[in-house]
């Protein structure tokens, strides 16, 4: 945490440049990113107050700064995946397992989006699909986390165990599978609840490329413009082509 490293007794007497170097030496890269984005947010707020006579609450400054960092991290991982030329195909889970794919969509200008999931068995049959619109999003990652929560809620309510859960959001998959301490990020509470749900259950969260997650992606985009929650057990017209391409058995 920042207060343990950057605000220790040894750091309090340092000038600003030495303090920044001290933080760089004592913080993990992820924490350092958060610190720099917070400092940027404070600097931007200072300029708004001096030059534009605009004031924000301290909590809003933190949330907006972390939202920008979340967008950077999310798009950075997406960009890294886009360089791969070879497309990945969706694959059936092993016999006795189900597979749940989820995805989220995000509109920066409206802060709204959609979330969706799809459940399939080991023969490639689509057992259920669901989604809904969401509002008051702070980032694309926020939509992905809510999509994961929707999928896990369905898993629990319908006892879909054991199962493989797939996402094309690498950051989300890493937060759910490799975190070793409570998440202090702005979405930390959501992540902590999901990690707690996953513990002790026959579920495995894995990362796949977008090309192997297209049906969930289309559901999320469709749900963004829907006024009601979606749940269907056969492919609607907007999914027919994607289902044939992604989930057919070769």
Image: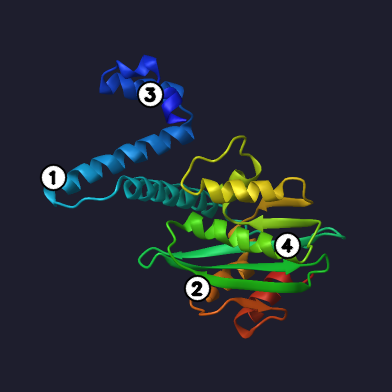
Q: Out of 28 and 80, give the one closest to the viewer.
A: 28
Q: CA distance from mark 1 to mark 4?
A: 51 Å
| Residue 98 on image: x %, y % | 79, 62
Name the residue carrying label 4.
155
Residue 30, label in figure: none
Query: What kind of element bears circle 3?
Result: loop
Name the residue carrying label 1.
50
| Residue 139 on image: x %, y % | 44, 56
Disc 3 residue crowd, few under 14, some 14–19, many 20+, Cα 10 Å: some
Name the residue carrying label 2.
224
| Residue 145 on image: x %, y % | 56, 56
Name the residue carrying label 3.
7
Query: What kind of element bears circle 4?
Result: helix
Q: CA distance from mark 1 to mark 2?
A: 39 Å
Lower position in the chain sequence, tag 4 or tag 2? 4
Give the left or right position of residue 199, taking residue 149 as reference.
right
Query: What kind of element bears circle 1?
Result: helix
Lower position in the chain sequence, tag 3 or tag 2? 3
Q: CA distance from mark 1 to mark 3?
A: 27 Å
Lower position in the chain sequence, tag 1 or tag 3? 3
Q: Quadrant of the C terminus?
A: bottom right
Disc 1 or disc 2, which is closer to the eye? 1
């Amino acid at each position: 945490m920042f207060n343990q490293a950057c605000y220790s007794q040894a750091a309090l007497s340092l000038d600003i440049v030495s303090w920044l170097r001290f933080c760089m030496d004592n913080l993990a890269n992820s924490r350092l990113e958060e610190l720099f984005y917070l400092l940027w947010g404070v600097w931007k707020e200072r300029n708004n107050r001096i030059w534009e006579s605009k004031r924000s609450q301290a909590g809003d400054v933190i949330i907006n700064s972390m939202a920008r960092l979340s967008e950077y991290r999310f798009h950075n991982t997406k960009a890294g995946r886009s360089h791969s030329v070879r497309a990945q195909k969706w694959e059936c889970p092993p016999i006795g397992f189900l597979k749940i794919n989820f995805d989220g969509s995000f509109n920066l200008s409206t802060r709204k989006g959609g979330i969706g999931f799809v459940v399939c068995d080991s023969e490639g049959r689509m057992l259920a699909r669901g989604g809904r619109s969401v509002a008051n999003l702070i980032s694309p990652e926020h939509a992905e986390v809510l999509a994961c929560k929707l999928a896990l809620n369905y898993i629990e309510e319908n006892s879909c165990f054991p199962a493989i859960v797939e996402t094309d959001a690498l950051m989300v998959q890493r937060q759910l599978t490799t975190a070793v301490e409570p998440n202090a990020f702005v979405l930390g509470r959501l992540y902590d609840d999901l990690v707690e749900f996953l513990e002790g259950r026959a579920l495995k969260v894995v990362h796949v490329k977008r090309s192997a997650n297209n049906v969930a992606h289309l559901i999320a985009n469709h749900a963004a413009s829907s006024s009601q929650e979606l749940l269907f057990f056969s492919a609607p017209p907007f999914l027919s082509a994607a289902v044939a391409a992604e989930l057919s058995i070769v």
